[in-house]
Structures are given as structure tokens and as C-alpha cells.
Amino acid sequence: MEDLAATLPMLLMGAWLLPLVSFALIVFLGPSMGKAGIKAGYLATAAIGTSFLLSMAALVLWLNGHGSELGTSHHGQTTYYTGQWYSLMEIGNLKLTIGYYIDSLTIGMFCMVTLIATCIHFYAQGYMHDELHEFTDPEITTSDGGKFTRPGRYHRFFQYMSLFCFSMLGVVISGNLAMTFVFWELVGICSYFLIGFYIERKSACNAANKAFIVNRIGDFGMLIGMMAIWASLGTFNFGDEQDATGQVLRNEQGDVANPGIFSHVRSEKNHYALKVPAGMAMLAGGDGDHDGDHDGHHEDEEGAQQAEHHDHDTASSGGSAPAGYYLLIVAGLGIFCGCVGKSAQFPLHTWLPDAMEGPTPVSALVHSATMVAAGVFLVGRFYPVFAPEVLLVIASVGCVTLFMAATIAITATDIKRVLAYSTVSQLGYMMLALGVGGWMAGMFHLLTHAFFKSLLFMCSGSVIHAVHTNDMTEMGGLRKKMPYTAITMLIGCLAISGAGIPFLIGFSGFHSKDAIIAQALNFAQANDNPLFSIFYYVAAIGAAITAFYMFRLWYMTFAGKPRNQERYDHAHESPKVMYVPLIVLAVFAVGVGWPIPGPSVTNLLEQARPAGTVATETGAVLTGLTYPNEHHAHPIPAGDTHATDAERKRADAIHTEANLVAFSTALAGFLLATMFYGLRKIDPTDVRQQFARTYRFLINKWWFDELYDAIFVRPVLVLAKMISWNDRTVLDGIVDGSVRTVKLVSRIDNLIDRLLVDGLVNLIARWTYDIGASLRSVQSGKLSWYVMAIVVGTVTLFVMASFVLRI
Amino acid sequence: MTNLLTQPVGVSHYMAVGAVMFVCGIVCMATKRNALGVLMGIELVLNGANINFIAFGSAYLQKDSAMSLGLDGQLIALFVIVLAAAEAAVALAIALNFYNNHHSIDVDRADELKG
Amino acid sequence: MAEFFTTNLIEYVSLSEAWATPLGYILAAMIHIALLLNVVAVGALGFIWLERKVAGRIQDRLGPTRVGGRFGWLQTLADGLKLITKEDLMPAAADPFLFRVAPYVAFCASFAAYLALPFATGWVGQHLNVAVFFILAVLGIEVFGVILAGYGSASKWSLFGAMREAAQVVSYEVPLGLCVIVPVMIAGTMDLIAIGDMQAGMVWNWFIFHDPFTFITFWVFFTCATASVNRAPFDLAEAESELVAGFHTEYSGLRWSFFFMAEYGSMFLVSVLAAILFFGGWNGPIPITEIIGLNETNGALAGYVGNLLGMTNLIIKASLGVTVMIWVRWSFPRLRIDQVITTCLKYCTPIAAMMFLGAALWILYLPGGLWATLRLSDPLGHTREAAPDQQAAAMPADGERE
Amino acid sequence: MDQINWHTFFFLLSALGACTFALMVVFTSNIVRMAFFLVLSLTSTAGLFFLAGADFVGAMQIMIYVGGTMVLLVFGVMLTAQERFVSLKTSGGTWSLAALAGGALLAVLLQTAFSVDDWKAGDTAQAGQSQTTATRIGLGLLGARFDEGTSGYLLPFEIVSIHLLVVLIGAAYLARAKRRAKPSADNPADRSD
């Protein structure tokens, strides 16, 4: 165990820093790395590949050390290692450190990110080969109507990819909120670079700016959350301070010596139940000393009564909730704001589809598997701190996003945009899952989705590479030309649609989506309020829509007859370096979610479940809000003695219903898509005309861009014009007037200078000249004279000092 | 007169040697016309000074060892040596430059700036 | 040893103490000198023979075969006799003083460096705390002999050779010094005996295996050492294809042989230095003498035998180094002077500097070196008590060896 | 007869060497021989340093002065050693003036040297038990003075490092081969740069 505490951080640090090394090397040596920087690709790939091996080593070590605890649901403390590598600065209480927080989630994410990134690096070596020589951008015409040609930027691409991997891994491994924020922003800037890779294209430029600015809005909320947490808790660390062997440091009373954020909110003393930390209560004006006695949401009756009692006492400051509870909500919402931006949730989702302007490997890496996953990851990491009310917000946002993005995806014809909206929609699934209390379900879907979404993106890249267009209306019948791509893409579609045999086994998406729907159902059943059933229904409908648009995409691309013969004729299967990664990812897309006994992904994730989140919880403000135990959405293992028979029965029922619903909705979507596009029994254009209004609404993406344009962009432009006018007339007038005054003054000054000052200076100069002329004969140019003068001077000084002055 | 060989030496003896070397250096600088000869004189002067530093830094050359400079003497001597090396490099470069321009190494020929 | 002679002189020869003390010291010093002179002179004898044999083999010849029976092992002696009997020539335009004194300067510098060179624990002419530094410094004087010879000969070939030598040696002192600093830094002392003793034990205690940086450092050190003792392919000072014989063009007879002895003496010296700094000095790959108890704790005789074995060990290692130098000389063409300087300034110096930095960081972050670090994760259960000797090494005990 | 003090004996030997060779530097007119005597003088000085217990500085003296600076000087001498510059004669007047000034300075310095009683004799019996100075000097240069508890010489050390770098660049710049705009026709040797 103590070895793990030393070796795991070492291994993961290596995995984390290798891409940085690659980045630094490419930055300084990139252009000289082989022809047009081709070795930069090898270097970056080698770096991330080694990172993957190190991550796998870490995983093996973890399983070796903690494998025996797999699969057992636990209610106690999560196993983790935390510590710091480097202290950036300490100002008073504020400690900014580079640290780590390693649990099985971290390791799982490391393996996933590095594996996918490695595949994508290989893939990109093939995809980006155009950049190896002079690159003529087909989408740009210069002002004189010619083609725009520039030197290739192969090495720069891999430079940013390396930096991106480093940043993403930094987010995953980071041990405190401040470090997370730093790497969070690094991820943002990397995506800015990569989206704007074709910087000469206006659209790419705009998309990069959009992504960056929209993310800033979310980050502003995140900063507020950070401030709320730091001001009240005084620490940024996630976990409790540990000694070198991974044991939590304790003081004499046996309490945790330096608790992290998680322990502040869900302390060991309080049986890991959510409780407003003393710091927050104090900051909110409540009496921090009595906090431990009265606050908190104990499951037992007595605690509830006490809480009620306390509520009456502080009715003025905290309403019905305990003091500081709102601060907890603000902190949670703030952090969630950042995640909304990064994970492209409603209403900040608009940047993600535009971000498809970047090269396809970028889309696959940045905007499907990792960067947007960072938001979900942070929600998952920060889960213990979210109050039930915040979770409700998360669920609502996820629900809206899920539905909205899925509907838009139905009408999109750009192959990458379909996938982009699908990504947004799936992220909405994850948020929904987290929001309804399905921590495991959300994280599980995050991992499985990363695999099949990157696979899908890379397949689409392969298609684009072959036909040189994004437009699906110009494709069709490509499966004969590109068998590998077609099959792997079909696997990806099946996985994302959640195909599988109910109650038995299926593609990875089947298991994760099933878990989400089950928890949504569980949540709906636990709350009487029918409004909460919306989550369940939207999730189920979303599954159908997902299957529909995914198979629409596949049919339009690969099945049927070619719609554009010329493009079809030029199409060809991609090189080996591109389709081998596809096959690797396809294998994972199939099997990563299988519930094999022992080291399955779910069991691994279960180990990282934040302490106390399986217990049933209720809201303090919305007192009707109840969060059920996530374990009770699945068949409860026979060994679990905590569960009652009723709970067992209910869990089985939920499982059965969710399984069937997930399967049947997906099947329905699939059949519908087959009817429309596969067998062509129904003509899509008819339907389109029939629902013209809806179609326009969807094809224009719910008018979101136009709405933001009207609300935010135009007013800002008008304001800017007004300020500009003010600058030019008022401010410039003042400045010009002062210039004229200064000119006048300086003329007068000039007169004084020439007559008075110059006269004086000239006089001194003449004196100096006369003295110099009389002294020139001393400068004989003979070195020996100078030396002797020094000696005689020294001796004279000495004689004077000792005999005349008698010092 | 006491036999010099049987007496322990002290700082004074070192200072005497230093003084001789120092004065030799001075005379060398004053009398040599070759620029490199002058440079050698400078080296002698610096060494004469260094001997004093070492002597005062030595723990056992004075009656009262607490009066010694201790390690400071050696450290300063070290700095002198290093700076002397730097000085020699620059002076040599100047001398070579002078030689390139004047085809002579005689410092008395370098008198363009004389008054 | 001086005390031994003094007491014996007083006791048996009944000299007064005033005379016995200086005599004792002089006797002890003379014995030391005689021993060391033997190392230089006999060593040179052997190595010149070795050079001729190795060169012969490399060029598919037999080399000397006749003198002294088999293998021509007395060839060098015969050469030496011939050199002694040769006329001592001096060019008319030469500066007589400098011409005469130059060979002695070269030889004395090479020989004086042996003063501080240990051959086994405690077996050293004069135990110095800054032995490594002293040896490098004194070795640097050797170049003066060459330069004075070049200038004093009043021959342009000699002058060219001397100028090259001056430029080369001054340049190569920089990477050589940097390379030496690496093991010195690891050992924490400049005392060669302490450095040698620190590498006692199994083969992986040798500093060359301490970390990857020392491993690379050794090769740089060997290259620079080859250059600084003027051996091919860096023997620009005597490049016979261009400069007749370089700085010793005008020399003949015994004076010439002094240069030769100085060269072989220096070769052996740097090889011994390399052996002590990187290859464990007098410690074998397996501490056999330690295992069978041949050390001071088991009596003076055991210690003496152990030291003798150690010395043999060291001399074998150093001879291997010399052999490699010979091998290199007969295998590689001579570099041009600009290539020599390029090798030094563009390759050796930066590499040595990087190795220095790397080794420093290694020590800082992996205390105990590579093996100690590996042992941390040793499956056989060695725990993380990293190398207590490392801490002991940081503050070496002084003045208690002799 | 008193016991001969060996420390004094070696001191006198080295001092004699240092002074004699320094004087020979002054009185030799041949520049190469001057350099040779200077080497001997500096080596003797190193011996004095060893005797004063400063073994590191002594070795440093040999390494830097003798092995580096002097080789550099001789290098310069050879580069400029044309026949007419090897022995430049100095006028008798300069000699006498220099002797006068030097003699006065020597008198003053010697008077100072022997003016303090405490300095006249030390306790050189301790000379044998010298301790390592290299480690302490190294620490002192890096800013830690454990013997006195004061701070060391880190700043001067860094300044000297920068200084050396500047000198290196400056010397290389000064001594670089200049490409003349117009090679003078009357001196073909000028073209050889």
C-alpha cells in the first residue's frame, strides 16, 4: 500500500509530463524535425504512447493493490492518494500547489484519455499528411481571386496536440481546485489553438473565438464558485492531507488534521452525510460553533427534528435552510457553471458545433472524448459538494441539452455537425445522470462515450478524407469503397445507440445508457412530484432520437446509391495508419462496458465513488426533493445486507423496466431510420414539408445563435459605436487642446533655454576646455610614467597618512 | 641575530615576500615596453597581493589565530585569481588587437591619444 | 616512514637527533621518489614495447621479436641505450636555456603529478585533500615544456606544434575539469583515496555505473584525457605528416626520450585517474580481499597483501586504459586543428556540462544513485533505507588515513 | 643548535624561489624567458600557499595561473614574437626612476610588514594538521559559512560568473579576425587574416 502511495504519483506524473516534454521539444526544435517536421508526429505519438503505457502500469498496480476491493459496494471512505509535488506560492492561507488526487477514477480517466489520444495521434499522422508540404487551402480565395498557399504546419499541429494532452491529464490528476482551474484554462486555450488551426479561414477564426469566449462565461461562474469555497473553507485541496504512506494525517483527537474540500462537506464524523461546513455557516452569519450540533441532514429522525429546530432560530438569515446552505449552493452552481461552459451544456452549447472547424482528429480528441468530458469529469469529481438543489439544476440543464441537441442532430446534414450535436446530447445524458444521483451512471457513460464518440469522429474524418466534403447529401454507398471505415462506424453507431440484448450483454453504450435510464426511473419513483418524471421520459425519448439520427447518418453515408458520382469515384479507403486506430477503438467501443466480474469498468469506477453519495438524501430548501440510492436502481447483490426485501423487489423492477425501455426506444429509433433512409419506404422530404415550421426551427438550431446575436452581440456593437463616437469627438478634442497649450509653453521655454541655460553651460565648457588644454602635457602616452605616478602617489599617500596625519 | 631557520615564520615574512613580488611587478610594469611584459608585471602585482590575503587568512601565521581572516582570505584570493585570469584574457585580446593594427607590441607606440 | 628511519638512525648509527631527523626525512623521500620513478620509467618501458607490439598487430606485422629472446621484450631497453649514446644536438639559432630546460619541465610536470596519485588505500606519495585537483593542475604544467621546446628550437615546425599544443591543452582543460567534477561531486570530496574507497564493494558501486550521466561522462573524460596528453588522434603538436615531428623536431638523444617518458607517464597517469574516478580504483568488481579478510583489521601483513592486490588491480585497469589509447592511436586518422577545437568546444564541453547538470540533479532527486533507487522497488523486500554511506560520504574524515 | 623548523625551511625555499624568479622576470629582457620565470615564480607562490594551509587555493593557483593564464600569455607572446619585439630595451633613465619608485614602495611595504609584533611569528606547529578547505570554500562560495555562521559569497560568485562570461565574449570579439575593407598593397602579410 505504501508503495502505491509513492509509485502511483510517480507513474502518473510521468504519463502527465511526457506530452509536455514533447510539446517543449516540438516548440523549440519542431521545424527542424525531419522533412517538414514529420518527426514531430513521431515524437508526439511516442510521448503519448508512453504515457498510455505508464497509465496502464498504474492501472495494473492499482488493481494489484486494490483489486480485492473491487465490486464490493462500500459506504465508507473512498480510497485515494493525494499529495503535492510542488508549491507555487503561499500567501497567508492561500496555498497554490501542484498536487495530485489519485483514485480509481483518475486512473481510469488516464487510461482512457491516453489510449484515445494515442489512437488519434496515429490517426492524425495519416490525416494531416497534407500539412507536410506546401498546403493550398481549398476553402480560401485570396483578394485577387487566387488560391491561398502556405507552408505546412504539421509540427505545429502535434505541438498543440501534445500540449492539449498534457493539459487534459493535468485536469484529471490535479489535486486541488486551483490547479484544476489552471489546467482547465490550459485546455481552453489549447482548444482555441486547435479549432483555429486553419487560422486563415474566417469561419475557423470565428469558431475559435466563440469557443474561447463562451468558455470564459462559464469560467467566470467557476471563479465565483472557487471564491466561495476558498473564502469559506480556506483550502483548495480535494482530499485530506496524507503522509508519505497514503494514510490520512490525524490530530490527537483522531480527527482529520488537514481536511480537504470533500471532508469539509461530508466529514467522517458525520458519516459522510452532506453538512454545511462550519466555515460556510460562519461566513453566512450563522453561529459556526453550534453548527456541528444542529445543522446537517441526518437520516435519523432526531437529527431532522434538531435541524428543524435550528431552522426556526435562524429564519432571518437562512430561510428554511441551515445557515450557509445557500453558500454551498452558490459554490456548487459556480463550479457547475464552468462545467456548463466546458461541456457545452445549455445555454452555452453553441460553441461546440462551430468548433468542428478544426481538423477532424481535433474534433475527435478535443470535442468528443476529452475536453468536453473535462466538464463532466469535474462535476463527477466535485460531486460530494453538490447540494441536492444543485443536482436538480444539473439534471434540468442536462435534460434540456439532451433533448435540444438530439432534435437538432436530426436535421443536420454536415456529418461532423451531426456528431457534434450528438456529443452535446450525450453530454446532456451524463449531466442528467449525475443530476439524478447516478454518479456511477454518469461517469460510466463518460468513459464509454469517449470511446465510441472518438471512433465515430475518426470514422467521419476518414470519410471526409476520402470524399473531401462534409456534406452527407453528397455521399452514399461508400461501404463498398471503404469497408473498414463502414464497419467500424457501424459499430460506433450501434454502441452509441445502445444496442444490445436486454438483461444480457450489449455494446458499451447499452450498459451505460441503461444505467442512466434506470437511475432516472429510480429518481422519478422516489419523488412523488410528477415533474421529476420528465427526466425519465426525456432520457428514453432521447435514446430513440439518438438511434434515429445515428443510423440516418450511417445510411446516408454508407448505404444506398452514390449521390455524387464524381466524389464517389475518387473515394478510397484510408491508409493503414488511419484505419488501424479505428479498429482498436471499435474493439473498445464494443467491450469496454461489459459487466465482467472483477476488474470491469463499473467496478473500477465504483471504487472511486465519493463517500456518502449512495445514501438517500433530501434537499434542505426544496424539502420534497429526494435522492435515492443509486445501487437500488440495479439488482442488489445477494451479499448486500443493508437492503430490505422491498428495496430488492423495487430494484429488480426498475432494472427490468429500464432495460426494456432502453432497448425498445433504441430499436424504435433504429427502425424509423431504416424506414426513412435504409429501405426508403418513407420519403424524408415529405415529412419535411409536412412539418416545415418545426424543420426550420430545428435546422436553425432552435434559433440560438440568432438569439444570442440579438441579445448580446448587437447591443455590444451599438455600445461600442457610441463609445467610439465619444472617443473621437470629446476625448480627442480635449487632447488636441492640451497639445496646443503645450506647444505655446514650450516656445517660451525654448527662449529661456537658449539665452540663460546655454550661456551658463557654454561658460563652464570653456573653463573645462582651458583646464584640459593645460593638463594635456601630462598625458604622455608612456605607460611607465603612469605606473610610476601611481606608485609615487601611493607612497606619498602612505607617508602622509602615517607621518603627517598619524592615522 | 637569531637563526632564521629555527624560528617559526609569521605573517610578516609572507608580507615581505608579497612586498618583493609586488614591487617586482610594479617595476616590471614600469620598465617593460612589451605589452605582454606589462601584463606579466600585473600578474606579479596581483600575486603579491594574494600572498598577503592568504597569509592573513591562515590560521597559524599569527600569534592570535582569532585575528586571522579565516576563510575570507582564501575566498578573496580565489576571486583575485579568477579575475586575474579574466583580466589576462581581455588584456591579451587587446594586445593582439593592438598588434594587428600597429604591427608592434611596444606599448610606447600606443600614444595616439596623448595630449 | 620518516619516523622509522629517524629512530633507527639514532639507535643504530648513533647520529644526533638534529642530523637524524633531516636524514630520515630525506631517506623516506628518496624511497618514495625511487618507487614513483620506477612506475614512470618502467611503465614507459613497458608501454613503449606494448605500443610497438599493438601497432604491429594492428598493421598486420609482428612488431619487435628479437631483443631479449621471445617477443622482443627488451626492445625498449635497447632503444633507450641507443638514445643515451646519441649526440645531444642543438640548433645554432635556438635559445639555449629554454631549449635545454624544456624536456625537464615536461618530465617534471608529468612526474610531479604522481606525487598525489594513490595506488591503494594509503599508498600514496603525499596524501592531499585536493588530490584530483592537484593532479589536473600539475598535469597542466606539462604543456609548458612543450611550448618552451617549440619556441626554444627556433624552428617553425616546432613553433607550429607548440602553438597548437597551447591552444589545444587550454581548451581541453575545460571539459576535462568538468568531467572530473562529476565523480568528485558524487563522492563529495577531492581526496582520491576517499573516492577510491567509496567505490568499494560490488561492481555496481563503481562510479561509472552510478547513473547514466557518469557513464557518459567517463567517455567524455577519456576523450578529453587523450587529447590533453597529446595522444592520437589529437597529437597535433607532433603531427609528423605535416610538421616533421612538431615540437620535438630539433630534439635528439636523451632529451628527446624525456619527452617520450613524459608522454607515457601522462598517459598512464590519466588512465589511473580514470580507473580511480570511474572504475573503482583498487577495488575489484567483487570485493574478494574484503571477503577473505585481507585488510588492516587482520594485521599489517594482511593489509599489505590486500593493498598489493589492490594496486595490481589498479595497474591492470590503468594498463587497459593505456592499451585502448594505443589502439585508438593506430586505428584513427589524425584530426585537423579546427576539428580538434570543434570537438572540444562544440561537443565535449556542452556534453560535459550537461552531464554535470544531470548528475547533480540525479544526486539531488535520487539520493543513493541508480542502484539504491532501484532497490527501493526491489521485490525481494529491501526497504527504502537509502544508502547510509551516502551521508557518511558527504563529510569525509580527514587526515586519519596515512 | 636548535631544531630546524621544517616549515620555515620550506617557506624560505619557496619564498626564495618566488622572489628570485620575480626578480628575474624584471631583469630579463627576453619576453619568452620572462614568461618562463614568471611560471616558476607563480609555482613557488603556490608552494607558499600550501605552506599557509591554503591547499585548494594553491592548487587553483597552479591550475588557473600556471595552466591557464600563463599558457594564454605565452600563446600571445608567440603570436607576437617577431624578432624585433622579443627583447625591447628600456632606457636607463626609466630604469633608474623605476628603481627609485619601486625601492621607496618596497621600503614602505617592508616597514609595514614588520611593524606589528603579533605578525612576526606564528604557531606553525599546527601546520601539519590542516583540514580540508575545499568543501568549506565551496560552501562559502555558494553562500553558506558554517565556520562563522555568516552568509557567504554567493553574490560575488554570481557576479564573477557573469563577469567571466562577458570577458569570454569580449575577448573573442576583440581578438576576432577582422576583414579589412581594403588590403594594403604594400604589406602582403596583411592579407593573411
Image: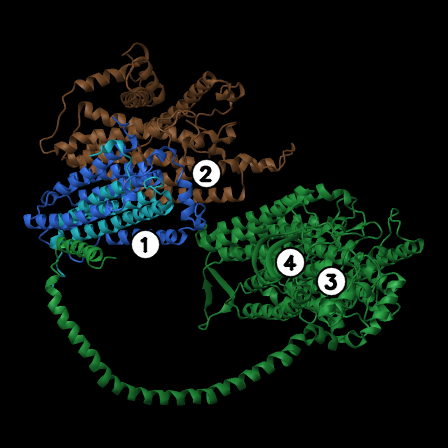
Q: Secondary structure at mark 1?
A: helix
The chain that appears green in the image is A
In the rendered structure, are the residues bearing label 2 and label 4 in contact, judged by CB atoms less than 8 Å apart? no
Report the amino acid beneath label 2.
Answer: Gly
Q: CA distance from mark 3 to mark 1?
A: 58 Å
Q: Depth check: A376 or D82 in front?
A: D82
Report the amino acid beneath label 3.
Answer: Val
The quarter holding residue A431 reads: bottom right
Q: Are marks 2 and 4 on the same chain?
A: no
Q: Position of residue C291 (x, y in %)?
A: 54, 21
Residue holding disc 4: A176
Report the amino acid beneath label 1.
Answer: Val
Q: Depth check: A265 or A543 in front?
A: A265
Q: CA distance from mark 1 to mark 4?
A: 45 Å
Quarter of the picture containing the C terminus of chain A is bottom left
The disc numbered 3 marks a residue on which chain?
A: A
Residue holding disc 2: C188
Q: Depth check: A387 or A169 in front?
A: A387
Q: In the rendering, what colour is chain D? A: blue
Task: Say whether residue C290 is left or right of residue C222.
Answer: right
